[in-house]
Amino acid sequence: MLRRLIPRRSAVVAAVESKIARHLYGFDQRRGIHNRNKKAMEYVAKGWSAIKEVDRVIDYCELNDRRLIPLLRGAKENFELALEADNLNTHARFWLSKLHLKYHVPGACKAVGAALLVEAADMGNADAQYELGCRLRVENDHVQSDQQAFHYIENAVDQLHPGALYLLGIVYLTGDCVKQDMDSAIWCFHRASEKGHAGAAIAYGSLLLRGVQVPESLTKLNAVGVSPPKRSRKKSENMEMDPLEMAKEQFQVAARAGCDLGLKWLQRVEQEEKLVMSEEDNECASA
């Protein structure tokens, strides 16, 4: 009897041990991936800091200034190390492509930069998709790239990239490559403005001053998450909001982003408000 039970018990123990081993192996794999991602992002952070330092001083020196070479070389090495640690890191691939395409880094190659940019965009990096879409929107008689550019910009918009939202809003506003759609343009400007994009905020505010109606989809979007008793009141407030006040809010967004044009628009709106108030006071006095 014992001899019959022992093999069964050993088989059960072996099955449990095998299951535990598979679980631990999967855990080790996930931990290894996490460690590689963490190490890669550390390299990306170092490279990004070096690029930001270059951007801070590049306006005050020549593009090929020798003093920038150590920073650029360090950034390039860090991004390459990030790809060695994690070849699927799209951030490292995107920033390395920018080094090759934009900066005078030793060993820069436009072809390598273009290939890295396409790879990062195809792997789903929103910044790369926006950058590639912008670069494809060039006038070239030998290359029909408008549809490709629109494809990458739309992919970046799906991830709510503010620059892509603004650019797509311009496309819908002008009817370039697509049918003109004012509601879609307003939606794009609105979402980009929410993320602090100065150009989108100015475009949105300017359209509001021209009397363009805010689409119903945005008013419904603003009402999402509001309790039922307050939802109708919130919607009515949005519908009755003064376009001048809404435009003023957009120009404030642009001003907070450091855009001088936003400040100029704010001054102009304030002057208009003072003019309207003075006219109302004169009417009341004459009455």
Image: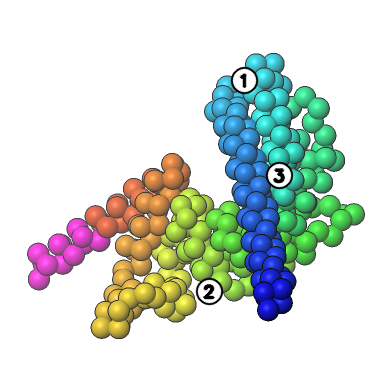
Residue at the image point whose x is 38% and y is 60% from the top:
247
The residue that mark 3 highlights is 86
Of residues 97 and 262, which is closer to you in this image? 97
* Badge number at residue 183: 2
Of residues 90 and 230, which is closer to you in this image? 90
Residue 56 is left or right of residue 253, and the answer is right
- Near mark 3 (Cα within 10 A), the count class, few <14, some 14-19 or many ≥20, is many
Q: Earlier in the sequence, mark 2 or mark 3?
A: 3
Between circles 3 and 1, the one closer to the viewer is 3
At label 2, the amino acid type is Asp
The magenta stretch is: 276-287
Q: x, y (%) of residue 280?
A: 18, 65
Q: CA distance from mark 2 to mark 3?
A: 42 Å
Q: CA distance from mark 1 to mark 2?
A: 44 Å
Q: Do the numbered discs 1 and 2 sit on residues whose CB atoms are within 8 Å?
A: no
Residue 267 is left or right of residue 90, and the answer is left
Quick check: can you spot residue 198?
A: yes
At label 3, the amino acid type is Asp
